[in-house]
Image: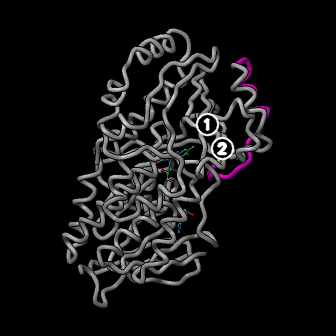
Amino acid sequence: MAGTNGSAPILISGGGIGGLITGYALARQGFPVRLFEQSPEFREVGAGIQLGPNIFRVLEKIGLKDAVLADAHRPPAQEMRDALTGKLIVRIPLEEAFFQRFGEPYAVTHRADIHGTFLKACQNSNLVTLETSRRVDSFEDTGKGVTVTLENGQKAEGRALIGCDGMWSKIRERIVGDGKPRVSGHIAYRAVLKREDVPKDLWRPEVVLWAGPRTHLVHYPLRRGELYNLVAVFHSDHYEEGWNAEGSKDLLWQHFKGQCPEVLRMLERIETWRMWVLCDREPVKNWTLGRVTLLGDAAHPMLQYLAQGACMATEDAVLLAEKARAHPDDLPAAFNAYTQDRYLRTARVQIMARVYGDFYHARGVTAELRDITLSGRTPQQSYDGIAWLYGGP
Ligand SMILES: Cc1cc2nc3c(=O)[nH]c(=O)nc-3n(C[C@H](O)[C@H](O)[C@H](O)COP(=O)(O)OP(=O)(O)OC[C@H]3O[C@@H](n4cnc5c(N)ncnc54)[C@H](O)[C@@H]3O)c2cc1C
């Protein structure tokens, strides 16, 4: 196997979805890995995540597709509805015809479930060492390896470093140096309900998106249908780093008042909302410097409107491990090849996610045009429109 036999580990900063899947993918290619997570435990926030067919194509390659699908829910369709009138704008079937077109399923899952599957895969590998309460502070590329300094002053030696440290990446500061993320002006509130807490007539197996003026609400079942995920998004200039602040209900109601009864009744079910201030960055052509590279949100943070951040991190990880396998003695070359293969695809998702956000939140004539355009589409035309994304990588 490539990269084994007493060689120094590849270091990873960050144990989110991106860091864990990278650790596992590299270990499968024979590389020892040492992963540092700043939190005292490995954990994901309580919310859902949508998984397009493109993630399953790469999970299949590394043997984790069935494990991810085991906890997931398979929605029969995606629906877009008008949040003011309640009318259906478009329904995109996600069953047989979708599978025939893309060769892989569409699923939704709890973030903790997919994160837990990746964590277990790492724990079961004798090549992956996982360390919590370890914050990576700085690094030095010595030409022959990388020395990382942790916040507690300890040093760690590796043959390379991969920054999987998310939107506010410390590693990115040195490699790309493009300052803070761009604040989109959009805020997402999230909540997860038990199935029995959702009124029977409101529970739907589909992924439903209620498009309103400068707002949208998405809901879908999670964990084999036992839970129900809600994400409400609206425009606001509020800024707060991190993914776990509590959101003010009054602010939410200011933005959703006047919407149709289904939307308002669903929002009323939520006692406490957690909040994400949505940010992204301009795409860049390169995020590798010598023996150090970036992955996932650290490399190409995107708005969530195409539901692809975790899917892109997973695609990154599997490709990066393949490139490392192809160049085990020249990781800078492997990292460069990985970046060059990934930057245009991820840039397209970053850019198109913004366009989709504008589309979901359209008002007046723009919303009318959106509805006419989308409602006239056949399922095959809808599939054609997203084939650049779901047909890859
Ligand atoms: C509202 C919303 C909905 C979304 N929906 C979807 C969806 O449906 N489908 C989808 O595919 N994606 C979705 N995403 C995107 C997805 O959540 C992210 O792209 C993905 O979680 C990024 O994973 P990551 O591992 O790159 O970063 P993160 O999840 O941010 O993980 C970074 C990790 O690094 C750790 N860390 C940070 N700094 C350090 C340091 N210095 N030292 C050590 N550890 C450090 C952090 O504690 C964290 O554990 C959504 C995002 C949002 C905001």
Verify CB contact (< 8 Å) between mark 2 and mark 1: yes
| Start-end of magenta stretch | 241-259
* CA–CA distance in space, label 2 to label 1: 7 Å
Q: Which x, y percent locates residue 138?
A: 47, 71
Residue under pointer 1: 219
Q: Which x, y percent locates residue 57?
A: 33, 52
How dense is the environment of label 2, judged by Cα within 10 Å: few (below 14), some, or many (20 and up)?
many
User: Residue drawn 67% across and 35% down?
Assistant: 203
Is 289 within the magenta? no
Q: Residue furthest bottom?
A: 6
Disc nearer the start of the sequence (2/1): 1
Q: Is residue 120 above or below residue 375?
A: below
* Image quadrant occupied by the N terminus: bottom left
Q: Is residue 201 above or below residue 109?
A: above
Looking at the rendered structure, the kind of residue marked 1 is His
User: Residue drawn 39% across and 67% down?
Assistant: 162
Q: Nearer the viewer, residue 93 or 281?
A: 93
User: Residue drawn 58% across and 51% down?
Assistant: 224
- Colour mode of the rendering: one colour
User: Residue drawn 50% across and 65% down?
Assistant: 117
Q: Which x, y percent locates residue 387?
A: 30, 35
Looking at the rendered structure, the kind of residue marked 2 is Tyr
| Circle on res. 232 | none
Q: Nearer the viewer, residue 329 or 53?
A: 53
Which element is circle 2 on?
strand
| Circle on res. 228 | 2
Q: Nearer the viewer, residue 327 or 389?
A: 389
